Amino acid sequence: MLMDSKPTPTIEDYLGVIFTLSRDGEKVIGARLAELLEVSPPTVTVTLKRMVRDKWVSIDDKKQIHLTPSGEKAARAVIRRHMLTEWLLSRVLNIPWSEIHTEADKLEHSISQDVEERLISTLKDPSACPHGNPMPGQESITENWLPIAEIPEGTRCKIKRIHESIKNDPQSMKFLEENRLFPETIILVQKKNPVKNTLQLGVGRSIINISFDLAKMVFAEKIT
């Protein structure tokens, strides 16, 4: 592989997923990639062999996948283009918040460096995407954010981030959008119900019941 070569769109998809999993401290293995990319395990195996050959990733003795320096550089680039595209779709084209991730997936591979630079300038170099996930290099902004499932009852907080792992789940994203559970919304964690596996939230004058599983994917910052 030539060091200045560009990964294919398929390889970029893999690199982006590997980057986000690694960033959040999750062990990256082939089965997890198959699940998130919605492809078969044999397809993942074949693709990973090609990525190892081309020095985008390495695989250790425990079958865990790691980005090489060139792989991380390419992953950061595709993640950044994806997030900038989400802002473009949201602010300029008014695509619904719950749908912009899916639409950005279709466009991110065709964004040129010139367009990327123009987007950064026009959007004032955002530190996060519209779902609150940090731009590569801006991970420190998440330092004080916790899953709302872990926040004590009676705590007021501001939603900051929707985890990447549910952005491909239309039903969950639609639920969050319809109930205004997106970044910068102020909520009150009211009551946890372990029996029903739900968390009761106050959002303005509304009471929302959200499943614990989804609440683990919504991060917020306590309001002091």
Image (cartoon, grey):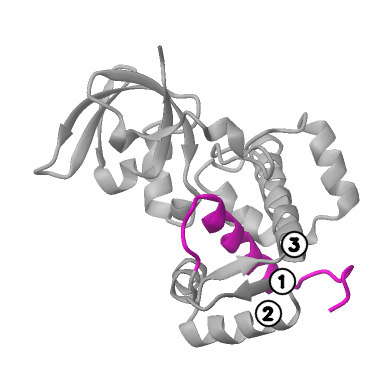
Q: Which mark is residue 200?
A: none
Q: Amino acid under label 2?
A: Val
Q: From the viewer's perspective, is 39 left or right of 125?
A: left
Find residue 198 and report its horizontal and vertical position in percent: 20, 40
Q: Residues within 10 Å of mark 3 (few under 14, many from 20)?
A: few
Residue depicted at x 39% and y 36%: 178
Residue depicted at x 82% and y 69%: 6
- Does residue 3 show up magenta in the picture? yes
Callout 1 secondary element: loop
* CA–CA distance in space, label 1 to label 3: 8 Å
| Residue hosting label 1 | 56
Above or below, 93 against 207 in this view is below
- Residue 176, quarter of the rendered image: top left
Find residue 184 and report its horizontal and vertical position in percent: 50, 24
Callout 3 secondary element: helix
Above or below, 18 against 50 in this view is above
Q: Amino acid under label 3?
A: Pro
Q: From the viewer's perspective, is 224 left or right of 212?
A: right
- Does residue 223 show up magenta in the picture? no
2 or 3: tag closer to the N-terminus = 2
Find residue 61 and report its horizontal and vertical position in percent: 52, 78
Q: From the viewer's perspective, is 37 left or right of 83?
A: left
| 208 or 154: nearer the viewer | 154
Q: Which mark is residue 69?
A: 3
Find residue 85 and report its horizontal and vertical position in percent: 70, 47
* CA–CA distance in space, label 2 to label 3: 13 Å
| 215 or 26: nearer the viewer | 26
Q: Which mark is residue 52?
A: 2
Q: Give yes or no for contact between labels 1 and 2 (Cβ–Cβ under 8 Å).
A: yes
Q: Which residues are magenta?
A: 1-28
